[in-house]
Amino acid sequence: MFSLLVERELKGILLSPKFTATFGVCSLLMLLSLFVGIQEYRHSVDQYNTAIQLNDRELAGETSWWGVESRVYRRPDPMQVFVSGVDYDVGRLSEISTWNEVKLQNSAYSDDSLFAIFRFVDFTFIVQIVLSLFAILFTYDSINGERETGTLKLSLANAVPRPRYVLAKFVGAWVGLTIPVLIPILLAVLVVLLVGLPMSADNWAKLAAFLGVSVLYFTFFIALGIFVSAITRRSSVSFLILLVIWVALVLIIPRAATMAAGQIVRVASVAEIDARKDRYSTDRWLSYRSSRMQQRDEREAQMANMTEEERGAFRAANSRRWAEEDDALRQSTTEDIAEYNRRLDEDLNNQKAEMQAIAFSLSRISPASAFQIAAMNLAGTNIDVKTRYEQAMQTYRNAFSTFVNAKRQEERAKDRRRFSTGQDEPLDLTEMPRFQPPDYTFKEALAPSVVDMGLLSLYSLLAFAGAFVAFLKYDVR
Amino acid sequence: MLRLIIDKELREIIGSTKFAVTFGVMSLLILLAFYVGARNYQISTQDYEAAVAENLKQMEGLTDWNRVDNRIFLKPEPLTALVSGISNDIGRTVEIQTQWEPRSEDSRFNEDPIYAVFRFIDLEFIFSIVLSLFAILFVYDAVNGEKERGTLRLAFANAVPRDKYILGKLIGSFVALAVPLLVPILIGCGLLPLLGVSMDSSSWIRLGIVIAAGLMYLGVFLTLSIFVSSMTERSSSSFLLLLVVWIFAVLIIPRTAVFVAGRAVDVPTVDAIDFQKSSYMSQLWDEDMKKMDEFRRSPAGQAEAQEDRRRRWRAYMSQLADERTEKIDAFAQRLNEDRRNRDLARQRVALGIARISPASVFTLAATDLAGTSLDLKNRFDVAARAYREAYTRFIVDKTGSSGAGWWMSGNNQDAEEINPYELPAFEYQAAPVSDYVTSALPDLAILMLFNFAFFAGAFLAFLRYDVR
């Protein structure tokens, strides 16, 4: 009996013209997004490789360690094809030097703002907006439509228990819609294999998890459609209600939640923080200079009553200690500044984290946000990509500075002149540390997504439970 | 007769539950957009003012103009909050130095990627996505729905000319949707001054045209829906067809067209240009090193006093640095111009193709009017360059040199403190209204063209429509 009901539902969906249209559109869109995504990925890989080459070439042209600085880049990740997340919004590179802090700059959208006008179309976008709309389109009249055509009364005139009927409706709709959606998805996977997108095992796992989350999200809208259809008498009403819910869940709540969080927590702007950092560093260097002057005066005072010869001897005897004192003073100044900057950054990051926590919790009321957050976490194109890279770049900068400073010392020992004449040999860069982009393993990706997967399951369950209960009390006449 | 048809259409729409629901939703959204826009504007204005003040404050106590780190900021505009365009994607801060070319950094989305995740609700978003969807929802069955219910046959049992009938349908549905829409918009406009957003007359005029463009865009989807409705027999198929068209026109074409066409035109990457600049820089630097070495070794002036020699050295260094800056500026300008020209060519191709969708046309018109189109980036760059020149003149005026060689000179400890408030002020100036309107005119014309084309289609289709 159950399988008969499911079969009937399946036939109803698969044979409708609606199905052909939506299936065609979905397949087209998914392949289109994949095409654009792969094109963009390749473009960014090219850009990444060229930039690294150019940077190496520039370093190879240097003849003195004095002015050596470098640039490090965010490595494109094939997962961005499916979930672009904030990848295009976050800076692609950071300058690495002994004097400037790490800061991601030059986001793809700020470099080429043309692409920012309408933004990107990726798998996530299609699932989040188009598939959810289609799910509604197929289920809005699943119960009340049958009532309107009179078939509901007929069906229930047989000995069909209502729970089984509504379950069959759900299963039928789910199978009828999910399996066809899986076909273009599998096709897409095939394309990925054919074009040789460099997907690691971890990436495949992430992709599988992402597809799982997509199905979960889709399931919610199917259940929601049946639910609303079971609490309304007329299909035109249920469609209208569903459309309004869809607009609210998909288009409004995610955006409104972030903006509300922005109003609750005031986060200082980077420009403001930078100015404060400058202020402190200026102050600190001014006081450094006056300490130096004071030190010099003290030393002069000690030598005040000496003859020229004694002075020379005194200088020679103390030169090492003085140099150490000078170095210590300079170092403590740099350290103070670094510490101050670190504290400011930490404060800023805390504010941001607080704001993010509020924004995400508020927006998760909507399954569309939960889905998007989970997708971005899985793909590694979440907002953490920024801190992840900034930390890795910071670590690299420390290694870089240590190395370059040591080299500068060597250079100074050899030749006290700070500037070369351009005729020296190029630098030996073989030992220079190289930047290793941070890894983002499947395990790391899965952990933060679990919450959202749980939420999506909960929402689906609630919607289905609602449909179930509503249908038990439904007046089939 | 026409009036009667319009009247009927009006009553039918306004009396429906659909109308009550969508009107409520739209009003809520529009008011939300205005409220949030105003609040956002206030917050970004606060940020801007804090940044400007901090920038000057951090210079207090310095004694040497050459040690100043000066930054300028993009001032938020009230319309930006209503039509955000690319304003969140471009850098808002520029560090101004005499010897480096200015470059904007710290885009809002890079700074706070959380906003990039879901983006903002603005008027442009609500119009282009939600309003168009609702337009379809109201008129997808304008003709074939009447046929299904049998009212179409009844109407034509009277002596109603078909052209009047279809025109009446269009006018009726347009008035029924547009007039109620204007209510929350006007309330929103009234809210702006109350929420502390001071709009000048230029902004009001531009906002007015943005709203007019929004109504034209609504018209495009109404005429399109009537067109499709009078081409199809059943309302369910016209709805499906319209939904597919909507998905493509609003969600897909703008995005894919720009990415596909945009990548077809080759534009050098910013990285490549940066490296060209820096390798030219180090080439110049190497040449100057040789010159400095020659200067040091030159026997001339060996006899002069150390103080004189040092002064002459400093002057020479400064001269070299200025020449270097001039050369690198000319070089950079050439590269930038070349990139910009190619970028413009790419924009023409990409946006030209994107314009097959009315949604892109509307977005482009609205962002042009609000001053948040691609031009914003260019205008800010130009303003920053002009400011850098003014700033360099100021520094030369104050210190006698552009300061390009300052790290070679000693710092004068006993000098007086500088007064940072003497610095030339930077305030981003919006262009005159006519500039914005002129750049939006072609898109407004295209929107009208869409209206006419779809209406003509609806008209022709309806003339041959089988009303039975």
Image: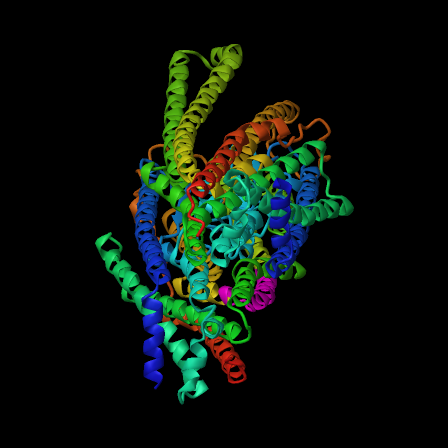
- Name the quarter where the N terminus of chain B is drawn: bottom left
Rendered view: B296 above or below B198: above
Rendered view: B401 above or below A388: below
Residue A5 spot, x, y in % from top left: 60, 45
Residue A110 visible here: no
Which residue shows up at 64% across the image and 54% down it?
A14
Residue range corresponding to the magenta coloring: B337-360
Q: Nearer the viewer, residue B378 or B387?
A: B378
Residue B349 colored magenta?
Answer: yes
Rendered view: A340 above or below A173: above
Residue A57 colored magenta?
Answer: no
Residue A49 spot, x, y in % from top left: 70, 43
* Quarter of image, res B253: bottom right
Residue B201 spot, x, y in % from top left: 28, 66
Which residue shows up at 56% across the image and 54% down it?
A112
Which residue shows up at 62% across the image and 56% down it?
A19
Q: Does B244 sit left or right of B157 as displayed?
A: right
- Decide whether the magenta segment is chiefly helix, strand or loop: helix
Rendered view: B30 above or below A101: below
Q: Nearer the viewer, residue B343 or A424?
A: B343
Which residue shows up at 73% across the image and 40% down it?
A198
